[in-house]
Image (spheres, rainbow, N blue to C red):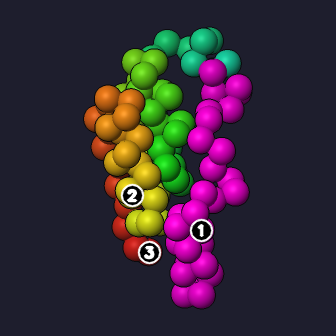
Amino acid sequence: MNLLRRINFNLWYFRRPPWDRGISPPELFDFISKHPAGRAIDLGCGTATNVITLAQNGWQVTGIDFAPRGDPDRKTQNEKMQVWLPICAWAM
């Protein structure tokens, strides 16, 4: 990803990114209902909405994202949902 695209992508997190609706999709809830809790990794976790949903349903989840601007949103959601989640962000 070139530098201009990375900067533009990170700028979305100053507002609500259009791809982050703040709710987990019904397909995730369907998956959770049909499978026993286990371990999962969410690559490109954004603000960690799906990571939190999985954790609240007994899953051990790690979220990974390269957009550090999403960090404040992830930390706020972790505190609000009262779950601790290992979430890694780094610049690529």
Mark 3: few/some/many CA within 10 Å (<14, 14-19, 20+) = few
Magenta span includes 5: yes
Which mark is in front, 1 or 3?
A: 1
For the point 39% across and 58% down, the residue is 71
Q: Bounds of the magenta span?
A: 1-29
**What's the CA distance linking mark 2 and mark 3?**
15 Å
Looking at marks 1 and 2 on the same chain, the residue that comes earlier in the sequence is marked by 1
* Snapshot quadrant of residue 4: bottom right
Amino acid type for the residue under numbered disc 3: Met
Q: Position of residue 82 (x, y in %)?
A: 32, 29
Q: How many marks?
A: 3
Q: Position of residue 73 (x, y in %)?
A: 43, 52
Mark 1: few/some/many CA within 10 Å (<14, 14-19, 20+) = some
Magenta span includes 15: yes
**What's the CA distance linking mark 1 and mark 2?**
13 Å
Circle 3 residue? 92
Name the quadrant of the C terminus.
bottom left
The secondary element bearing badge 3 is classed as: loop
Label for residue 49? none
Amino acid type for the residue under numbered disc 2: Asp
Circle 1 residue? 12
Amino acid type for the residue under numbered disc 1: Trp
For the point 56% across and 14% down, the residue is 35
**What's the CA distance linking mark 1 and mark 3?**
17 Å
* Residue 68 to residue 41: above or below: below
Q: Position of residue 20 (x, y in %)?
A: 63, 50
Label for residue 71? 2
Looking at marks 1 and 3 on the same chain, the residue that comes earlier in the sequence is marked by 1
> Is disc 2 in contact with disc 3, using a CB cutoff of under 8 Å?
no
> Is disc 1 in contact with disc 2, using a CB cutoff of under 8 Å?
no
> Is disc 1 in contact with disc 3, using a CB cutoff of under 8 Å?
no
